[in-house]
Image (spheres, helix red, strand yellow):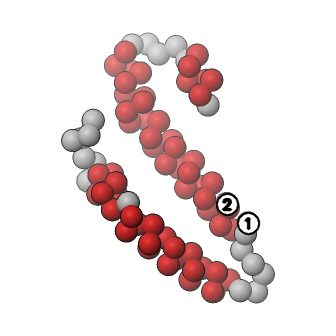
Amino acid sequence: MVELENTFPFQSEAEEINYYRNERPKLFQYGIYYERLLDLESEKPIGKERKYYKELETSLHDDSKTIVEELKYYRLDSAEKR
């Protein structure tokens, strides 16, 4: 992806800024989400789904506590860091 981005001919500087500021983060957001989902589902043990998902829920909850500021930033569509 980096190779493609480096060689992509943007029409203007504003278009390039828009891509890196708005479009690229959205693309990575979904890429990371589906990669993590695939990892979680492919490692699921047979016969112990309920316990496995409960542990994942706890882990997700703990993760969200550590990145609370980033969550606020994206949920509120904040422009203060742009």
Mark 2 Cα shell of 10 Å, populated few (<14), some (14-19), many (≥20): few
Q: Furthest-right residue in view?
A: 46
Q: Which mark is residue 53?
A: none
Please give the name of the residue rendered at 56% of the width and 75% of the height, measured from the top-left corner. Answer: 56
Q: Furthest-front residue in view?
A: 66
The image shows residue 82, relative to residue 52, as above or below, that is above
Q: Amino acid at mark 1?
A: Ser
The image shows residue 40, relative to residue 82, as above or below, that is below
User: Residue beneath label 2, please?
Assistant: 38
Front residue of this view, candidates 1 and 15: 1
Please give the name of the residue rendered at 55% of the width and 24% of the height, measured from the top-left corner. Answer: 5
Q: Amino acid at mark 2?
A: Leu
Q: Is residue 30 visible?
A: yes
- Percent x, y of residue 80: 21, 41
Front residue of this view, candidates 69 and 44: 69
Please identify the quadrant where the N terminus is shown.
top right
- Left-right relation of 42 to 6: right
Q: CA distance from mark 2 to mark 1?
A: 6 Å
Q: Furthest-left residue in view?
A: 80
- Percent x, y of residue 55: 57, 80
> Residue 8: which quarter of the image?
top right
User: Residue beneath label 1, please?
Assistant: 42
Please give the name of the residue rendered at 27% of the width and 35% of the height, measured from the top-left corner. Answer: 82
Q: Is residue 75 visible?
A: no
Which type of secondary structure does the marked residue at label 2 adopt?
helix
State yes or no: discs 2 and 1 in contact (Cβ < 8 Å): yes
- Percent x, y of residue 10: 47, 16
